[in-house]
Structures are given as C-alpha cells and as structure tokens.
Image (tube, rainbow, N blue to C red):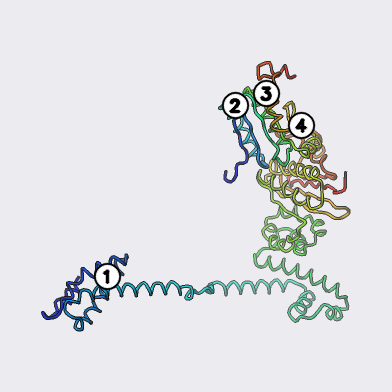
C-alpha cells in the first residue's frame, strides 16, 4: 500500500493504541483487524484502545468488525476500549440500529486509557466479573 | 597513421619536420577535447594549417605556432558548439507531421455522417441542413413549415440527438441488439432525464453491452451537470468513494453534519450489497429541487436479484455473516426508500433524503 498510513498501532507499556486515520473500506478494515490481533500477541498486550475519531462512517460492517476485534482481543487476553466515536456517527449508528455490543467505549483517548488503567479492573482474571 | 607518414615522406629535407609535431599537437588537443574522434579531426586540421603556414614561419618557431594553432582550432570548435546550442530551438519543427491515416479517418468520418444523415426522415434532414449549413434561422424555418420558432428549435434538438445516435451506430458498425436500445440512446443523447427515467436508461446500460459501449460520448455532453454524480461500483474501495461522493454532493444543500453522516451510512450499506451480491453496478447521486430540496441515491446492479424483498427489508435477515442491518438500516436512515428487484436481472434501490425533513 502506498501513500500515508491508514492506521497506526502504537505500543504504550502494556497497552496498544490503534488509531484509524481515514475512512477505511471493508478489506482495509479486515487488514486492520488482523494486524491488530497479531500485534496483541507480539507485544503481549493487556489492553487495546481503538481510536475511530477519523472514521467518516461506522456502518453495519464497520461496527461489526470492531465487535469482532474486541472479541478476538478478549480471547487473546486483552481488553478493548473504543474511543472517539463522533456525535454524528453515534447518531447514525443509533438510527441504523447498530451498537458496539458489550464492547466498552470512552469519549477520547485519555478516557480510554483511564478506563484500561482503572484500579477495579486491574486486568486480572476476574476483571469481567468485577466489571459486570 | 598512414596519412601523416605520407606527409612526412613527401617532405624535402630542408622543410621543417611537421610529423615530429604530431604527438605534441595530440597532447594539446587531447587535454581539451574528450571525444577521441573529434580530437583526431582537430589534430588533422591543425596539421593542415601548420603545413600551409610552415614556409612563412621562422624556423624554430614552428612548435609554438603549432601549439597556438591547436588551441585556436579547439576554441573555434567550442564557439561553434555554443552557437549551435543557442540556436538549436530555431531548427525544431513543432508542427506535427500529417499522420498517414488522417486522410482515411477523415473520409470514414464523412461517410459515417452521410450515412447517419440518410437515416433521418426527409423533413428532419431538410430542416437540419437549412439551419446548420445554410444558416437559416428558426423563425423563417417556422414560417415555411407553418410552425413556431420554439417548436422548430425543439425539433432541431431532437434531430441532432438522433443524428448523434445514428452517427455512432454507423461508425461503430453495429445494429442495436434489442428494440429498447434506440429509445435509451435517444434519451441519453437528448439529455432528457425524464425520458431517461421512463425508459429506465440506467438499468439498460448495465444490461446491454452495446449501449454501454456507445453511450459514453452521448453522456459526456450531459455529464457537465454538476448536480449529479455517477459512481461505478465493483470493489470495496468504491463503497468508500460512493459514500464520500454522496456526502460531498449533499453538503451543498445545507444538510446538517449529522444528516450527511446518515446519508453516507445509508449509501455505504446499499453499496456494500452491490459489491457483495452483484459484483458490479453503479450508484447515482443527484440533487433534487422538486418538490423540495433533497438528495436522491439510486443504486443499481445486475446481480441475481433479491428473492424476497419483504424478508430482506426485515431486521436480521442476512444471507452472509452479517448483522442483517443493511437494507432495513438504510431504510431507517432515509426519508424515502424503495427496492425493486427482479430475479436474475438485478436490483435497484432508490432512496431519498429531504433537506428540510426533521
């Protein structure tokens, strides 16, 4: 792929920060998914923040892919937070009848990192029970 | 070198030994001129000059004379090269030569126009020729024909549209394969959008290969309309292109950002269906001003069609591993929504968002 990077996946301690920089089509979305899940294993990450602020649209495929990523990451032992859903995108998702399932969301990157670092979760095995 | 040996051999004993100067002259010129053949030419020229001048040069001064001559010869070469470079642009002929097939093409062109003209009715042809060739204005034509200037102008427009179609048919040497082709091509050529909708031109172009091939030059004339966009859909990336084009065009109407995102999301859903199920199709985005300002999106494909449209419009209906939100979701996002699908022929989704609707 040429031109500027479409996504970036940066490591920050135990966490990965994955930012989408532009509108992605379906196959790019799937590449992003595979890349991210692979990197979770490589960096032994415990948490992932996905920043979707630059996505123009979160349609059924986009939202579904995010859910899949979160589920795959969970199976690989990492917790996922989606941040940066724009108000108009949120409105479209609700109108469409979409949601992000049980994937936690946060307003922005700061909130997302705060969520991952919250003392209650502590990224222990009992985290999901404690959160639920 | 044979030539110099020859010169040397002819020398009478009293004459200065020019041949002995050769290595030195070579060195002087070789230091200034890189190209060996040019250098050798200059060496020969220097020797000729020295030989001619030898009787006039004082004995013992021949060597310095040869050196100066060699330098001068090199300098004049440089000057000449410099002058050539400066004037090079003057000798370039920028007018392209006549291609050998120009004549032939012009003749074919002429024959095609003549054949197309022959296919018009006598009355159409006479009126067109009187107006275009003889320069008769529409008013006097109207008087002759017992009609009005406006009617004559409209008639002329229709004739021109037909002439364009017939010309293309003659030039491409094809007969329209179906009886729908001509009306569609005529509607496209005339740029009459109401007529294009009546004959369902968009769908026909997807289905008929001949018309798809013939139509681009006809559409180029009307494509200049800036309130309509046509995006061919075949791969994933086209989905993004279509939704961004729709957003861009709709943003001109003063839709709020939220509504633009709704439109883009709906376009994304229906366009994805084309890529997934039909493989190829097109999305047309057009701005409406009647009855209200709005944007209409038409997504067409020539896929297998949807067997049960009602079921497909229900939430959760999915034939692939999706959420089944595509069509019903898009329907919720737009103000008007219609699906027409014919098994084996394809699907057309038409949806509209009105600008002032809340």
Q: Residue at x 80, y 40 (%)?
A: B309
Mark 4 nearby-residue class (10 Å; few <14, some 14–19, many ≥20):
some
Label 1 resides on the chain identified as B
- Check if mark 3's residue and mark 2's residue have beta carbons within 8 Å: no
Q: Position of residue A33 (x, y in %)?
A: 63, 33
Q: SS at mark 2?
A: loop
Residue at the spot of label 4? A99
Q: Position of residue B308 (x, y in %)?
A: 79, 38
Marks 3 and 4 sit apart, C-alpha to C-alpha, by: 24 Å
Left or right: B63, with B293 as reference point: left
Which mark identifies residue A13? 2
Which mark is in front, 2 or 4?
2
Do discs 1 and 2 belong to a common subunit?
Answer: no
Mark 3 nearby-residue class (10 Å; few <14, some 14–19, many ≥20):
some
Residue at the spot of label 1? B40
State the quadrant of the N terminus of chain B.
bottom left
Q: SS at mark 1?
A: helix
Q: Is residue B6 visible?
A: no
Mark 2 nearby-residue class (10 Å; few <14, some 14–19, many ≥20):
few
Left or right: B210, with B180 as reference point: left
Which mark is in front, 3 or 4?
3
State the quadrant of the C terminus of chain B.
top right
Do discs 3 and 1 belong to a common subunit?
Answer: no
- Check if mark 1's residue and mark 4's residue have beta carbons within 8 Å: no
Marks 1 and 4 sit apart, C-alpha to C-alpha, by: 86 Å
Label 3 resides on the chain identified as A
Which mark identifies residue A117? 3
Marks 1 and 2 sit apart, C-alpha to C-alpha, by: 74 Å
Which mark is in front, 3 or 1?
3
Q: Position of residue B236 (x, y in %)?
A: 66, 43
Which mark is in front, 1 or 2?
2
């Amino acid at each position: 792929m040429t031109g500027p990077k479409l996504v970036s996946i940066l490591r920050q301690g135990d966490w990965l920060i994955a930012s989408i920089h532009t509108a992605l089509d379906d196959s790019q979305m799937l590449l992003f998914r595979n890349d991210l899940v692979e990197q979770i294993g490589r960096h032994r990450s415990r948490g992932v923040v996905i920043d979707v602020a630059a996505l123009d649209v979160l349609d059924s495929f986009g939202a579904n892919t995010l859910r899949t990523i979160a589920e795959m990451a969970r199976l690989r032992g990492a917790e996922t937070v989606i941040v940066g859903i724009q108000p108009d995108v949120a409105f479209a998702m609700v109108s469409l009848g979409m949601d992000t399932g049980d994937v936690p969301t946060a307003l922005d990157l700061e909130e997302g990192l705060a969520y991952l670092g919250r003392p209650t979760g502590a990224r222990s095995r009992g985290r999901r029970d404690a959160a639920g | 070198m044979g030539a110099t040996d020859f010169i040397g051999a002819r020398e009478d004993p009293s004459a200065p030994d020019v041949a002995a100067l050769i290595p030195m002259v070579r060195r002087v010129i070789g230091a200034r001129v890189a190209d060996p053949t040019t250098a050798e030419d200059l060496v020969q020229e220097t020797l000729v000059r020295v030989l001619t001048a030898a009787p006039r040069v004082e004995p013992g001064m021949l060597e310095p004379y040869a050196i100066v001559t060699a330098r001068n010869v090199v300098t004049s070469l440089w000057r000449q090269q410099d002058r050539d470079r400066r004037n090079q642009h003057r000798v370039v002929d920028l007018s392209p030569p006549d291609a050998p097939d120009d004549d032939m093409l012009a003749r074919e062109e002429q024959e095609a126009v003549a054949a197309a003209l022959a296919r018009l009715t006598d009355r159409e042809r006479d009126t067109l020729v009187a107006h275009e060739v003889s320069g008769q204005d529409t008013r006097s034509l109207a008087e002759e024909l017992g009609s009005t200037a406006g009617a004559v102008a409209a008639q002329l427009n229709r004739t021109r549209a037909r002439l364009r179609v017939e010309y293309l048919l003659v030039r491409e040497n094809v007969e329209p394969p179906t009886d729908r082709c001509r009306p569609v091509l005529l509607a496209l050529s005339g740029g009459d959008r109401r007529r294009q909708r009546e004959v369902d031109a968009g769908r026909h172009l997807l289905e008929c290969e001949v018309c798809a091939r013939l139509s681009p030059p006809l559409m180029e004339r009307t494509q200049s309309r800036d309130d309509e966009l046509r995006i061919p859909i075949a791969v994933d990336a086209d989905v993004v292109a279509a939704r961004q084009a729709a957003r861009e065009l709709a943003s001109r109407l003063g839709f709020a950002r939220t509504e633009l995102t709704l439109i883009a999301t709906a376009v994304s859903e229906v366009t994805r269906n084309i890529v997934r199920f039909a493989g190829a199709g097109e999305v047309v985005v057009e701005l409406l001003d009647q009855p209200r300002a709005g944007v209409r999106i038409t997504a067409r494909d020539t896929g297998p069609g949807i067997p049960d449209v009602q079921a497909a419009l229900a939430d959760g209906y999915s034939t692939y591993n999706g959420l089944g939100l595509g069509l019903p979701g898009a329907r919720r996002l737009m103000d008007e929504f219609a699906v027409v699908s014919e098994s084996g022929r394809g699907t057309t989704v038409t949806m509209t968002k009105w600008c002032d609707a809340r």
